[in-house]
């Protein structure tokens, strides 16, 4: 891979490692004048709250007009960096900017867009980027907004997380002997990979079966339980169930029955039992009766044979395992670091919410942990509003073929939903937010972004629409297109924050240097829970991806299917896992 | 005479109120000086993002760049390619809203 290809790596994130090289005119300009002319533009940079949009004006109320034709209403007006002459640029008919560059002595090719504060080379007729200029613009925007930003409860654990490089390991002779003596090899089924086993429907329990199938094949969760990290025998022993005299704890009197029952109830132990059964190599369908019973104990309000919501079950189950496994009960989950239990370690991420006052630019930031992301489907008006010219693709120079967003055709995509999730949203007049700087309720702009990505992202598509007007709910069956590989970079807080500054090179890491963004934001799809039917009567089916093969898990029936079937399915909960894991450096320096 | 003979038609929002260039000039300056133009621009930006127009344009640009090759595309190319489609696909309700706003402004500014 040549270095040229590396430098032009097209990435949503526009960072210091991948910026376009200067055009010859810019290089010459820099060589002759250094960075002084850009610095002197700093005085003319005006940043306007709330978004801090930067413009170039000699005085705050200046009306820029083209020196050649006097027009001030052009969409693009450029100011020459060398002599401050303003010219318009409206190709192909007119370009006084280009005329200026050719008519003046060399050195007047570089200009700046007065409304966007972006550099332009009039000779090359293209946008150019300069590190020093962008630094000056970002600085002016930051100083306008910086005094207004207060961060509340910034998660302290995210800074300076040390990482250990991956070290490959293979067993030596002694390890091999140990492993072989303590275990027996599984019979390898040639037709299907290990771990694929149907789950019997115990009475409308497809909501549970579908989620369980997805969790049984969630790589970090599967690895955790299969490497005996939660041993059900040891756990029961610790809770003093088998031996009422154990550890000096005595269950006295009537507490005996209840205490024993609660101690015996451990969803993680039941998960452990299930993992052992599913991966045992036995192909007959398994009945998760014990697990169902334990879950009913935990979520007694949902204990019935009625149909339930899979997502509700998912949340309830994660919560149940957390309660029983939480190592340190004093640390509540609101930190989002996932040190409390395995389910949070796997699924917990942190969302950042910024609320910006429209009047003064004051921004209030909060961080909230989450175990999944619930996404709204696009409202239906997105389709018909487009004019006919958008739909006739073949006539438009073949641009249609590589449209991966698909929005022109009216198809909803997962990335489209994520775009809408992280889009700045105006809180209307009836939702005014109290601005601490203005000391009064103001209209504001709210924007969500992802501060920390979880190991496994679960996207829950809100397919149930409740209408309070009609007092009824209905299911939204609209198809949602989801990719097999997903790059979450554009939805990270760092990207969202950067995009507020416009099209810039960042010589520094913005205001949030954190190692967690160095790690890959690339995710791979591994499970899709789909729903078919109506709001109150339907059926859940899970599709699993193992070794790039897709399998359909419909209660007790597991079959191999083509990936196109999966692409066409109606996704309800979509699971992605990070492509690359990393090892966290241990606090105690124990020898590896 | 400060106006160029070959001036291309500029279909900005104030067009239907007067075809004479001088009149348009005055309106534009008035809009800028009072800060109304900035507010209208912000409103327009917000509406175009809300209805998905910005995302569509982004997708068109990406498709064009993919087809032509990253290194062969200039800003002018992109503007030339998406301008006709962009202009055609703006929803009518947005145009109506902006015209309404400009009319209202002019009425109160003329007093």
Image: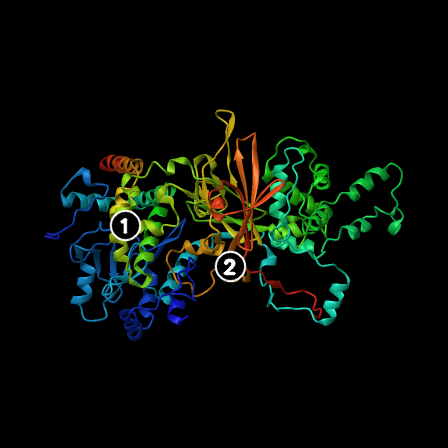
Query: In this rendering, would A159 be left or right of A173?
Result: left
In this picture, is A231 found above or below A34? above
Where is residue A90? Give x, y as percent. 21, 54
Q: What element carries label 1?
A: helix
Question: Which label is found at residue A154?
Answer: none
- Distance (Cα) linking label 1 and label 2: 35 Å
Circle 2 crowding by C-alpha within 10 Å: few under 14, some 14–19, many from 20: few
Residue A11, image quadrant? bottom left
Q: Which colour scheme is used?
A: rainbow
> Which residue is labeled 2 in the image?
A512
Total count of labels: 2
Where is residue A270? Give x, y as percent. 72, 46
Along the viewing direction, whichever of B43 and A420 lies nearer the viewer: A420
In this picture, is A23 found above or below A578? below
Q: Can residue B4 be seen in this view?
A: yes
Along the viewing direction, whichever of B98 and A339 lies nearer the viewer: A339
Circle 1 crowding by C-alpha within 10 Å: few under 14, some 14–19, many from 20: some
Where is residue A1? Give x, y as percent. 42, 70
Outermost bottom residue: A31
Query: In this rendering, would A422 be left or right of A454?
Result: left
Q: Which residue sits at x=52%, y=62%?
A: A518
Query: In this rendering, would B35 be left or right of A541?
Result: left
In this picture, is A14 found above or below A167? above
Along the viewing direction, whichever of B8 and A315 lies nearer the viewer: A315
Residue A54, image quadrant? bottom left
Outermost front residue: A190
> Which residue is labeled 1 in the image?
B82
């Amino acid at each position: 891979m040549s270095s040229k290809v590396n430098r032009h790596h097209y990435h949503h994130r526009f960072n210091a490692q991948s910026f376009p090289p200067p055009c010859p005119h810019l290089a010459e300009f820099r060589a002759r004048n250094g960075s002084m002319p850009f610095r002197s533009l700093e005085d003319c940079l005006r940043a306007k709250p709330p978004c801090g949009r930067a413009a170039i004006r000699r005085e705050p109320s200046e009306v820029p007009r083209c020196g050649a034709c006097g027009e001030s209403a052009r969409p693009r007006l450029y100011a020459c960096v060398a002599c401050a002459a303003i010219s318009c640029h409206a190709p192909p008919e007119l370009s006084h900017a280009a005329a200026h560059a050719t008519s003046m002595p060399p050195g007047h090719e570089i200009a700046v867009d007065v409304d966007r504060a972006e550099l332009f080379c009039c000779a090359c007729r293209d946008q150019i980027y300069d590190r020093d200029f962008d630094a000056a613009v970002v600085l002016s925007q930051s100083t306008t907004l910086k005094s207004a930003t207060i961060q509340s409860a910034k998660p302290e654990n995210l800074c300076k997380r040390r990482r250990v490089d991956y070290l490959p390991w293979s067993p030596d002779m002694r390890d091999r002997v140990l492993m072989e003596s303590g275990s027996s090899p599984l019979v390898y089924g040639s037709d299907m990979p290990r771990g694929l086993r149907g789950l019997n429907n115990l009475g409308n329990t497809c909501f549970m079966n579908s989620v369980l199938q997805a969790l049984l094949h969630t790589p970090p969760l599967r690895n955790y339980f299969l490497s005996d990290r939660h041993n059900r025998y040891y756990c029961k022993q610790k809770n003093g169930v088998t031996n009422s005299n154990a550890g000096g704890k005595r269950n006295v009197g009537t507490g005996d029955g209840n205490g024993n029952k609660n101690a015996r109830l451990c969803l993680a132990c039941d998960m452990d039992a299930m993992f052992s059964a599913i991966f045992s190599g036995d192909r007959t369908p398994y009945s998760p009766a014990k697990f169902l019973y334990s879950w009913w104990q935990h979520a007694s309000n949902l204990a019935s044979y009625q149909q339930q919501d899979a997502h509700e079950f998912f949340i309830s189950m994660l919560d149940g395992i957390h309660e029983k496994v939480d190592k340190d009960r004093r640390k509540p989950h609101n930190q989002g670091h996932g040190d409390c239990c395995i389910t949070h370690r796997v699924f917990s991420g942190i969302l950042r919410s910024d609320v910006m006052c429209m009047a003064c630019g004051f921004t209030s930031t909060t961080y909230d942990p989450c175990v999944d992301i619930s996404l709204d489907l696009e409202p239906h008006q997105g389709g018909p509003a487009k004019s006919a010219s958008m739909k006739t693709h073949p006539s438009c120079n073949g641009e249609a073929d590589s449209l991966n967003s698909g929005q022109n055709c009216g198809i909803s995509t997962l990335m489209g939903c994520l775009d809408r999730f992280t889009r700045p949203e105006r809180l209307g007049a009836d939702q005014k937010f109290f601005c601490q700087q203005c000391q009064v309720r103001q209209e504001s702009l709210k924007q969500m972004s992802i501060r920390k990505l979880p190991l496994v992202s679960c996207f829950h598509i809100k397919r149930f629409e409740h209408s309070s007007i009609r007092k009824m709910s209905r299911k939204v069956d609209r198809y949602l297109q989801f990719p097999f590989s997903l790059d979450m970079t554009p939805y990270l807080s760092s990207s969202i924050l950067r995009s507020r500054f416009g099209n810039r090179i960042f010589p520094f890491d913005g205001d949030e240097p954190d190692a967690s963004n160095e790690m890959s934001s690339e995710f791979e799809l591994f499970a899709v829970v789909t729903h078919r039917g109506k709001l109150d009567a339907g059926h859940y089916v899970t599709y699993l991806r193992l070794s790039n093969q897709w399998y359909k898990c419909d209660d007790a029936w597991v079959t191999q299917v083509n990936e196109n079937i999966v692409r066409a399915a109606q996704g309800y909960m979509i699971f992605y896992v990070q492509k690359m894991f990393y090892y966290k450096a241990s606090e105690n320096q124990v020898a590896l | 005479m400060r106006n160029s003979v070959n001036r291309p038609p500029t279909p900005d929002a104030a067009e239907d109120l007067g075809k004479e260039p001088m009149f348009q000039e005055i309106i534009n300056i008035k809009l800028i000086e009072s800060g109304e133009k900035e507010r209208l621009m912000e409103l327009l930006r917000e509406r175009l993002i809300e209805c998905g127009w910005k995302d569509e344009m982004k997708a068109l640009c990406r498709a064009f760049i993919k087809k032509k090759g990253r290194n062969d595309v200039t800003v002018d190319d992109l503007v030339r390619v998406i301008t006709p489609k962009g202009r055609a696909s703006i929803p009518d309700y947005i145009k109506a809203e902006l015209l309404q706003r400009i009319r209202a402004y002019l009425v109160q500014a003329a007093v």
